[in-house]
Image (spheres, coloured by chain):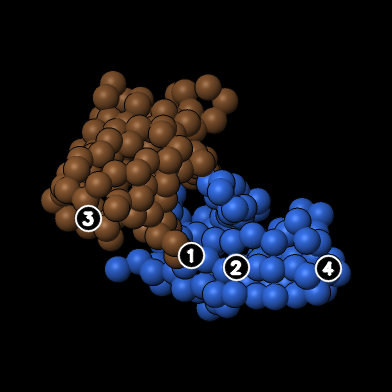
Chain colours: A blue, B brown
């Protein structure tokens, strides 16, 4: 069945450093790849997404890259800040269904 | 409302009791999802409603779990004869659903219901 793998499960970085989270997906029909951030006690919130017709998308300090051939996509956070500390989930979806397949999550800790 | 609303925010129950968790999706959203998140774990898909279509129940872990969506809006997740392993945060999300072509399947999540089974 469809599967999304996410690594690492935990990530600790010093404030100001970069953080990278990687995901792979199995369904070649997937064409939509969102990233969600979940802060403590809250539901996940969309922070950035990318469609399969582009290879990279940036929004201030965050960027997502996509390699459709390899079925990889990654989240890059530059100049990390303590408020970036949260659990991050990648997901994959396709245009013929509303369902998203979520990765297992990455707990990011940014130390001041 | 402005976002997805879930109630109660916390629920403590005794083993063997039935519980009902409620989700009010964003107005106009045709798709509604339930997920379970055990402590420190990822999002476990439970069930998905899309408009008037038959729900996708493929993620329900046992027949003690069921969900309804009345009038295409509010949804209730029911857990019968609760067990301690049912303790988790139950998250609801909604999305605008397919409108043809390349539509962003952005899911908007509620804050969840934290269920504790003693």
SS type, badge 2? strand
Q: Left or right: where does residue A88 sit relative to residue A103?
A: right
The reply to whether discs 2 and 1 touch (Cβ–Cβ < 8 Å) is: yes
Vertical placement of residue A13 versus A99, above or below: below
Circle 1 is placed at which residue position? B40
- Of tags 3 and 2, which is closer to the observer? 3
Circle 3 is placed at which residue position? B83
Q: Disc 4 versus disc 3: distance between alpha carbons?
A: 41 Å
Q: Residue at x 17, y 55 (%)?
A: B62
Vertical placement of residue A10 versus B98, above or below: below
**In the image shown, does B84 or B28 lie closer to the viewer?**
B84
Q: Disc 2 versus disc 1: distance between alpha carbons?
A: 9 Å
**Residues tagged by mark 3 and mark 1 found on one chain of the structure:** yes
The reply to whether discs 4 and 3 touch (Cβ–Cβ < 8 Å) is: no
Vertical placement of residue B62 versus B98, above or below: below
Q: Is residue A99 visible?
A: no
Chain for disc number 2:
A
SS type, badge 1? loop
Chain for disc number 4:
A
**In the image shown, does A107 or B107 lie closer to the viewer?**
A107
Q: Residues within 10 Å of mark 4 (few under 14, many from 20)?
A: few
- Of tags 2 and 4, which is closer to the observer? 4
The answer to which quarter of the image holds residue B93 is top left
**Residues tagged by mark 3 and mark 2 found on one chain of the structure:** no
- Of tags 4 and 3, which is closer to the observer? 3
Q: Residues within 10 Å of mark 2 (few under 14, many from 20)?
A: many
Circle 4 is placed at which residue position? A112
SS type, badge 3? loop
**In the image shown, does A10 or A59 lie closer to the viewer?**
A10
Q: Disc 3 versus disc 1: distance between alpha carbons?
A: 19 Å
Circle 2 is placed at which residue position? A107
């Amino acid at each position: 069945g469809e599967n999304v793998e996410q690594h690492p499960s935990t990530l600790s970085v010093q404030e100001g450093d970069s953080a990278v989270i990687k995901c792979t997906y199995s369904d070649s029909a997937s064409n939509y790849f969102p990233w969600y951030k979940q802060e403590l006690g809250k539901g996940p919130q969309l922070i950035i997404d990318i469609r399969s017709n582009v290879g990279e998308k940036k929004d201030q300090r965050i960027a997502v890259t996509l390699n459709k051939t390899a079925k990889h996509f990654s989240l890059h956070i530059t100049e990390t800040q303590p408020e970036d500390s949260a659990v991050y989930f990648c997901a994959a979806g396709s245009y013929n269904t509303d369902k998203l397949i979520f990765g297992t999550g990455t707990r990011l800790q940014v130390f001041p | 409302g402005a976002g997805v609303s879930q109630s109660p925010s916390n629920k403590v129950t005794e083993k063997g009791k039935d519980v009902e968790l409620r989700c009010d999706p964003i107005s106009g959203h045709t798709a509604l999802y339930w997920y379970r998140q055990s402590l420190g774990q990822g999002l476990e898909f439970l069930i998905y409603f899309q408009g008037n279509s038959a729900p996708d129940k493929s993620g329900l872990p046992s027949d003690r779990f069921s969900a309804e969506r009345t009038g295409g809006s509010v949804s209730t997740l029911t857990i019968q004869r609760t067990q301690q392993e049912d303790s988790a945060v139950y998250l609801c999300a909604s999305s605008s659903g397919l409108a043809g072509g390349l539509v962003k399947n952005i899911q908007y999540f509620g804050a969840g219901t934290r269920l504790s089974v003693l």
